[in-house]
Amino acid sequence: MLGKFWNRYTASTTTRAVRVLGTAKPSASIVNFRRSLCRISATNNEEASAKAAAANADSGAPTIFDKIIAKEIPSTIVYEDEKVLAFRDVNPQAPVHVLVIPKLRDGLTQLGKAEVRHEQILGQLLYAARLVAEKEGILDGFRVVINSGPDACQSVYHLHLHVLGGRQMKWPPG
Ligand code: 5GP
């Protein structure tokens, strides 16, 4: 409800801002204002799609990552072994942004569903993240992120580690 209101508010505010600006070259502050509106709007979209994805999280339905594992859709593979696949994120958030996933999901839709039987694969995924960081030349500084559940904006329900690097990371994360 609040989300819908906010979407309408940001859309109408953007429209007003564009109308006021006309075709004149916008000032730096207007450009920054527009950028921040876009960011707010994108954040809303991410949260909405994360909530929608969570609704099917435990249905057992295949995800887009199953197609990537089966090589039915293309991906840029960075590392692969018997248990683990690592490929570049289609929407990179840093110069290096690689996803590390278990080839067999085995109930690991999200980290929050991990059980004792998953200990070994969880360790293998983390070690694979380190191998990816080495291959990508970012061992001096990289970040590993796992979004688990809708409040963390998880959008694909097949456990995955994001390996991010190649730029200065900020803290705290958003
Ligand atoms: P999450 O939001 O669940 O933590 O991360 C899912 C990630 O998967 C996102 O960063 C998104 O860009 C990435 N992704 C979604 N679909 C595809 C795809 O078809 N190919 C690749 N390479 N990445 C994808």
Image (tube, rainbow, N blue to C red):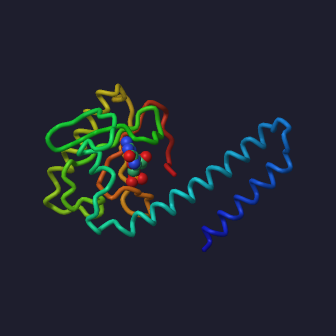
Quadrant in which the N terminus is drawn: bottom right
In this rendering, position of residue 53 left or right of residue 133: right
Query: In which image quadrant can residue 152 be found?
Result: bottom left
Residue 50: x %, y % from top left: 45, 61
Residue 114: x %, y % from top left: 23, 61
Query: In which image quadrant can residue 72 be found?
Result: top left
Residue 153 or 21: which is nearer the viewer?
A: 21
Query: In which image quadrant can residue 21 be found?
Result: top right
Residue at image position (25%, 34%) is: 79
Residue at image position (36%, 38%) is: 98
Residue at image position (32%, 32%) is: 133
In this rendering, position of residue 107 left or right of residue 50: left
- Judge whether residue 143 can be spotted in this image: no
The residue at the far front in this view is 72
Residue 56: x %, y % from top left: 35, 67
- Judge whether residue 88 can be spotted in this image: yes
In this rendering, position of residue 49 left or right of residue 110: right
Q: Relative to residue 55, is residue 26 depicted above or below?
A: above
The residue at the far bottom in this view is 1
